[in-house]
Amino acid sequence: MSVESLIGRSLPRLEVREKLTGRAQYTADLYRPGMLHGALVGSPHAHARIVSYDVRAARAAPGVRCVLTGDDFGDHRMGAFIKDEHAIAKGKVRYVGEPVVAIAAETEEQARAAALLVEVRYEELPAILTPEDALAPGAALVHEDLASYFKVFEAVCGGNVCSRTELAEGDLAQGWRESDLVVESEYRTPAQAHVSLEPCGALAEVDPAGRVTLWSANQSVFRIQASVCESLGLPMSRLRCLTPRVGAGFGNKMEAHIQPIVVQLALATGRPVKLILSREEDFEIVRTRHPFQIRVKTGVRNDGTFVAREVEVVADGGAYADDSPGVLGYSLLMARGPYRIPHTRCRGTLVYTNKLRAGAFRGFGNPQVSFATETQIDEIAARLGIDPVEIRRKNALGTDDRWFCGQRLGSIGLAECIAVAERESGWADRAKLASAPGKRRGLGFACTAHISGLLGTGAIVRLLEDGSVVLNTGAVDIGQGSDTVLTQICADALKIPLDRVSIASPDTDGSPYNWGTTASRVTYTTGRAVFAAAREVERQIKTHAAELLECAESDLELRPGGVVGIKGVPGKELPFVAISARAHWRKGGPIIGTNSWVFDQPTFDPKRAVAIGLPFPQIGVYSFGALCVEVEVDEITGKVDARRAWTVADVGRAINRASVEGQLEGAFAQGLGFALVEEVVWDGPRLANPTLMDYKVPTTLEVPYELHAHIVESPDPDGPFGAKGVGEIGINVVAAAVANAVAAATGVRLRQLPMTPERVLRGVLASQPGG
Amino acid sequence: MSALKQVHFPKTPEEAARLLARGDGVRCLAGGASLVAMMNLDLVDPDELVSLAEVAELKGIASLPDGGLRIGAMTRHRELETEARLAGPFAVLREAAGKVANPPVRNMGTIGGVVALADPAADYPSALVAADAVIELASERGRRRVPAREFFVGLYATALAPAEIVSAILLPPAAAGVGLYDKLARVAGDHAIVSVALAVTRRPRGDLGVGLAIGGCGLTPVHRAEADVLLAAGALGDAAARRAGELLAAAADPLNDVRASADYRRLAIPRMVTRAVARAREELGRLG
Ligand SMILES: Cc1cc2nc3c(=O)[nH]c(=O)nc-3n(C[C@H](O)[C@H](O)[C@H](O)COP(=O)(O)OP(=O)(O)OC[C@H]3O[C@@H](n4cnc5c(N)ncnc54)[C@H](O)[C@@H]3O)c2cc1C
């Protein structure tokens, strides 16, 4: 009997009806009896010492049940890489908007009204607003006690330098000697806001035994549990973290936001407390993509062979380290791109400033460096008179190559990605592109690669009495569709229909550890665990069946529909219900398959490379991609419109094609925002555009109707069904490809994002004779 | 906490005006697209609202005996966007309506609301100035008419008196001509960085009447009669267009804001004017 595999199909999301009918429950929808509402008082200063609080009026205000200041929190710090952050400002404030006082009241209006009554006395300190300020001799220190903070890696830090990382292979001096042409430029990229549809929020409740349950918008219940406990000095056994539906996370919900404060309010009042950030607060106090200053120098031979590259990055991390050391290190690891460049050195400096922290954001530093490196490749190609696609193909990594710093590559579909993007876009005929009067059209190309996750993950597959299955992984589906994909993997492995598998909601009490929904990792890492746990269930089923059918386990096979039978003997079979009933009631015990693993392939090979301040020793397998974008530039205003795009990714194996396409399309849209319009702007120390009126993201009218997502499948030897990650890869080189297209259309090379009409028009005018 | 105590539903403009006279805390409510958003942000906190929803006279677009149009203040952007009678030079208003925000806002917001609010970043004011429209106002004292070119006086400031409402927008009889509205914005649905509103009428004797106004570049629409005259006299030629554009760029007082710099706006005005004028010239040529 042959049944269509569940793998590779465009199955609809499991929760599609719930979401389309508005029944999905997000944190804001939750209610608990006796629930209070929280509100925050934010710092008006970028950098100041807190002298005193006067909260008497707020405490006396109607409905107020609790007012907490930094003095009500212990001296505990959290941080993914450097423990530098209290749950709420304590002693000092380090950015405008930083929470200094938290209030719980009977209604949200009362809590917010009371917040206006709080008086805090500050002694202002010099505000460090740029990396230049931060690195200036004698600059005020954002963290005076940096040296004493606990760090999870060998951080090279001091002064306002949060961390420095250097990665190198080969011999740069030799590289420059061997180069016929050396090109060097500087690039700048802005802070970008995540703008997830759902603002951050949390709800905490203390049970009669004093144990806290916390529901929140997050990308990892386990990271939240760790961060809250670390920042409040609680044992992890005292906190249970749960996740209702999440309205997207692009990195903003990976580390804690307001969860520690909400838990402290609940502990202080003994009542449930909910706090949902307004859109403005979400802009002001969560996190952004790092602004980068990037210098790239590349040496090539006249035939287009890449020989040497030097990269220097200065990243503005804002007031707290958060995921920044990781972002910096990762960006440097990506700065050689998916190419062979024998002599490469990438160095980066991450600085503290008195601004909102920067942190994880789809691409994790890759979009920033790729904007620089992938546009510089086009400049080199132009100087050498080589086709931009050809020069990439010529230098592209092959199966025998290693990633920068030495990691082995399991599968590389890069050549095919390039070929697909080239063919589908009609690249060869691009000279024939017709432009409307007053417009100029051009095509731009770029290549990329990205990891598929790292760190620890697990899965538990339990066979219920009736032969159906409960899958529990602890992975948060943030809207990208992992619940569906993991269910497909589990159901396919056991050859049972999708609706016979239910997937448990992440719960730190009951789910196996999962580092998080981040780093494009869930399908690859958790998928592997699910597959292995399902295999374990299969093994146990076969042990029972072998006894019942009196045959060897190796003679047995799973048959579609939840049946195990003897190979080649159609009548000899048993349904899972028979096996499970036996296991539950008579012999062996309930069938539970588990698996857990941690990614352990080294990133760095000391025989090939030098690495200083590397924040992560082991980091995922690689997905590859290519992108071609056609833009139209308005000659009058300089406005750039993306007209068509072909986004191609090697994802190993698409478990759910529609979901993979959705990730590529969504990432393209977000990348287009980064390329053309999005920028978090500071007016002095304060955000100038923390609203959706002033901060704009692309709409459906900006995203080209002709956005073609193409899937290449070069299976990873260890991935579930060969799958690799796809969550981020589609964003990495959108800005670069758009910039290359703008250059093709106008001859103007922009090295700063976003490519606003103003920047494009000024570039065009400056390049015209007499301009 | 909201102070709102009461919402009134008058049936005539005069009754609405009388209710508004009850005090400073009384505001009128049209589509609510802006007012309710401002209330949600605690920027305004009215005690009472006077809804214009049931004032029959404010609804719809009527053709006047002289061939002109009377656009009721409660006419939604969506209705204007699809209104075939907004032809010839008045297409400027139709095009502007189609470029306001996004479909939900266009289904909600009204022309009277935009005119009364006088947000400097809005789309209609420059279009109404270009079209030389007249704003009709109603109060307990009766009706009065103010040309759009005199109506917008500053930031959220108009010729509207206390306890007075916008009752209609009046357009003169349509003549042959072309109207167009070019809006440069960061993304669809955003307010304009620069907008160009142009209405050109071919008079019976063959000479041209031109109205050109710039939006998004100051507290009120930027309009200069000399520029209109230049364009008419120069038969919409490129040279005249450039001079008119430069004149308006000099007259504009744009801001540096998150949408664009003031310098860029000044740079873009003559360029966008020249393009708009060229388009009008071509369309006029096609009219024969
Ligand atoms: C997200 C968003 C985007 C927008 N983008 C644009 C844009 O790109 N371009 C643009 O032009 N506009 C834009 N707007 C504004 C939109 O056009 C509103 O519809 C308009 O400003 C107000 O119209 P309204 O009928 O909703 O008025 P309301 O919100 O009901 O009222 C606005 C103000 O005018 C007063 N008022 C209303 N009607 C009258 C009247 N007849 N007489 C006297 N006073 C009156 C009210 O008291 C209030 O003070 C946007 C609005 C939103 C919410």
Image: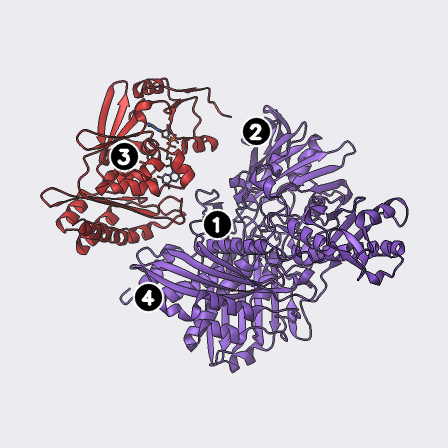
Chain colours: A purple, B red
The residue type indicated by label 3 comes to Val
The residue type indicated by label 1 comes to Val
**Residue A767 badge:** 4
Chain for disc number 3:
B
A403 horizontally vs A596: left or right: left
Both marks 2 and 4 on one chain: yes
Would you name the residue on which mark 1 appears? Answer: A680
Q: Quadrant of the C terminus of chain A?
A: bottom left
Chain for disc number 2:
A
Mark 4 or mark 2, which is nearer the start of the sequence?
A: 2
Q: CA distance from mark 1 to mark 4?
A: 29 Å
Taking the image as drawn, is residue A152 in sight?
A: no
The answer to which image quadrant residue A240 occupies is top right
The residue type indicated by label 2 comes to Ala
Judged from the image, the secondary structure of the residue bearing numbered disc 2 is helix
Which tag is nearer the camera, tag 2 or tag 4?
A: 4
Judged from the image, the secondary structure of the residue bearing numbered disc 3 is strand
Would you name the residue on which mark 3 appears? Answer: B153
Would you name the residue on which mark 2 appears? Answer: A114
Q: Residue at x 46, y 78 (%)?
A: A181
The residue type indicated by label 4 comes to Ser
Both marks 1 and 3 on one chain: no
Chain for disc number 1:
A
Q: Quadrant of the N terminus of chain A?
A: bottom right
Mark 2–mark 1 CB contact (< 8 Å): no
